Image (tube, rainbow, N blue to C red):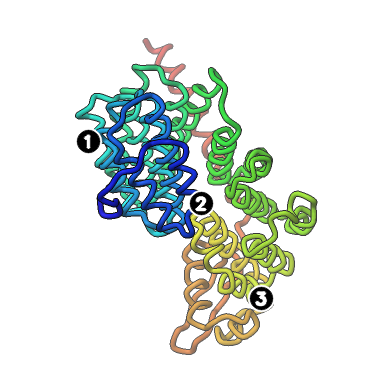
Amino acid sequence: MSSMESSCLPATTESIAKAQEAKDASESISILYRVLQDPSSSAEALRTKELAITNLTNYLTKENRAEELRNLLTQLRPFFSLIPKAKTAKIVRGIIDAVAKIIGTSELQISLCKEMVEWTHAEKRTFLRQRVEARLAALLLENQEYTDALTLLTDLIKEVRRLDDKLLLVDIDLLESKLHFSLRNLPKAKASLTAARTAANAIYVPPAQQGTIDMQSGILHAEEKDYKTAYSYFFEAFEAFSALEDPKAIFSLKYMLLCKIMVNQADDVAGIISSKAGLKYLGPDVDAMKAVADAYSKRSLKYFETALRDYKSQLEEDPIVHRHLSSLYDTLLEQNLCRLIEPYARVEIAHIAEMIELPVDHVEKKLSQMILDKKFAGNLDQGAGCLIIFEDPKTEAIFPATLETISNVGKVVDSLYMRSAKIMA
């Protein structure tokens, strides 16, 4: 061990106290490593070593020594054979969670989980392996390695369903729902979420997990443009996370505000933010949604683009918000352009761009798209840089009536033919 001293210390409460009283973290870490070297395997020594591992994990996490945490898991394998499997699982998952708290360690976490999966296979520790594999699938999903994550989850779900471990099944079904959503397979995402809810109804689900289920439900409803139902799910998730002081609460609040904007109730955003629950989460994410709501209320594309630029990480880098705001931006742009071109039969594109305060090429591209989508009848004269708007051709009311009359006459003739055929027979 790189951080271990050559001499060991007895695994006693005095040694633990000595580590806590050390003048700095490095000295505490060194003492705790020496405690773990104690060859004693008495019940008291094992309990002390478990405490030493917990303290050592905390010190290494605070010092951002992720690689040492990984090595610690490898070094503890002989010790795991001396303690119950449930305690082993608790320590392993605790160290993996500790590595996750250190920023920029996603690749290391994936590598660590793969190592632990191999070890649990060899040691036949099924309970621990399934949970580490579920964690690995979540990490692969975060890393956008969708194919590997899906392969891993497919096999894991079959195995866990056979064992009927409902608590783990809820986690895995939720993960599968998120994975299918990322792959834009909405029917399968909904099916997996329904499976997670079914499993959750049969057991007690911790509030954090229930909040995650509600959050995913809201995301899927929002994807189907059912923003009112999505809002109610996000509200439930927000209440659950807020009570637990979970960082996910800010995302629930953010998506609640997004739903209000999408159902044309942008004026309600300020009220939600200024409420007792909303004031607790003031920050860049809430400011970003407030800026979007203000821009939407004023029907101003300029303010909308300013908000997207000023809060890029909060809006464009959040895939859920970005997807819905893109749709909102397009709708707002089309409404503004239709309103501006309405008085004209022929107008310069540069003039429209000046009125709407957007680049000419951007406006030209959008107008051509609107013409192709038949949002209005017109043509782009690129040589002259003009938009020519045609009057909507009015269909004469007599034509559909004539076609209907001819169709009815045809039916009468067919009916008479059938009758005459019967008489002749």
Q: Which mark is residue 118?
A: 1
- Residue furthest left as drawn: 122
Q: Residues within 10 Å of mark 1 (few under 14, many from 20)?
A: few
Q: Which residue is mark 3?
A: 340
Are discs 3 and 1 less than 8 Å apart at CB? no
Residue type at numbered disc 3: Leu
Whole-percent x, y for residue 386 in the image: 53, 84
Are discs 1 and 2 less than 8 Å apart at CB? no
Query: Image check: 267 left or right of 223?
Result: right
Whole-percent x, y for residue 369 in the image: 48, 68
Helix, strand or loop under label 1: helix
Which quadrant holds residue 168?
Answer: top left
Q: Which mark is residue 326?
A: none
As measured in the structure, the alpha-carbon distance from the residue carrying label 3 to the one carrying label 1 is 64 Å
Helix, strand or loop under label 3: helix
As measured in the structure, the alpha-carbon distance from the residue carrying label 1 to the one carrying label 2 is 38 Å
Query: Image check: 153 left or right of 254?
Result: left
Looking at the image, tell me whether mark 3 or mark 2 is earlier in sequence order. Answer: 2
The answer to whether 65 is drawn above or below residue 246 in the figure is below
Residue positioned 31% across, 27% down in the render: 41
Q: Which residue is mark 2?
A: 21
